[in-house]
Image (cartoon, grey):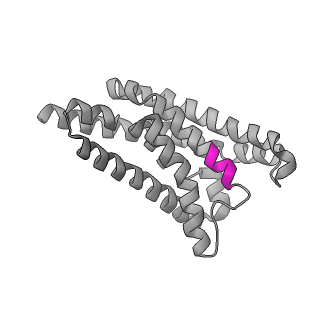
Amino acid sequence: MIENVLSARNAATGKKVTVRSLVIVGVIALAVALPQLVHLTLGQPGGVQWLPMYLPVLLGGCLLGWKYGAIAGAASPIVSFAITSLLGSPMPPAARLPFMTAELLIFALVSGLFSGKIYRNGLWAFPAVIAAQLCGRGAFLLLTVIFNSLTALTPQMVWSQIAAGKWGLLLQAVVTPLIILVIRAFLVREKKND
């Protein structure tokens, strides 16, 4: 969606790169900070239930499109792991890191595929988020089935975590598109004022 807005405004290539880079950094920063806040206030069960890293990644996919959203999605758990490891409490844990990286990459990739449609009609954010959630969580589960012998994660554990996070997914399926609608309305209004 950001790419569409910048193109419609005939923004210079340098400005596009700067805006895109700022949004990517913002998504990653929010994906690192939001889980810390949730874990600080609600503990680790709060993270499993509310899935705070997913919201910024879904926003990033919808705003940045599939290519740059995927970069932000994959980088988010890696950067979070690196920073929180330095602080002595890695999040996500090392055993989950490859799975979450793949899952969030898919979240951003799938929601990003809808970016052009969202630019034209903001209501596309709702199916974008739901499709991303289904594909991302499904990929996480499938990867644990495939790599079951190489990890402590079992499909049963992942399924129970998916069930525990259903309220977080539901909340994000509503809140994320509403945030996108507000951002879109602001960007479209700004475009008309140019």
Residue 98 lies, in percent from the top left, at 68, 51
Corner quadrant of residue 79:
bottom right
Q: Residue at x 70, y 47 (%)?
A: 164
Which stretch appears magenta? 97-102
Percent from the top left, x then y, of residue 49? 64, 51
Q: Is residue 13 visible?
A: yes
Q: Quadrant of residue 179?
A: top left
Horizontally, is 31 left or right of 118 in the view?
right
> Is 43 placed left or right of 38 in the picture?
right
Percent across and percent down for residue 150 are 84, 51
Image: 35 above or below 62: below
What is the residue that sits farthest to the right in this orientation? 149
Residue 113 higher or lower than 171, as above or below: above
Give the farthest residue toward the left: 194
**Along the horizontal axis of the image, is 68 left or right of 110?**
left
Residue furthest front in the image? 13
- Quarter placement of the N terminus: top left
How many numbered marks, from 0 up?
Answer: 0
Magenta segment main secondary structure: helix
Residue sitting at 63 percent across and 44 percent down? 102
Q: Is residue 95 above or below residue 165?
A: below
What's the residue at 70%, 55% (across, down)? 96
Q: Visible in this render: residue 55?
A: no
| Residue 34, magenta (yes or no) | no
Q: Position of residue 60 (x, y in %)?
A: 44, 43
Q: Nearer the viewer, residue 109 or 54?
A: 109
**Residue at coordinates 62% horizontally, 49% vertically from top-left?**
101
Classify the position of the C terminus by image quarter: top left
For this rendering, which residue is in front, 149 or 183? 149
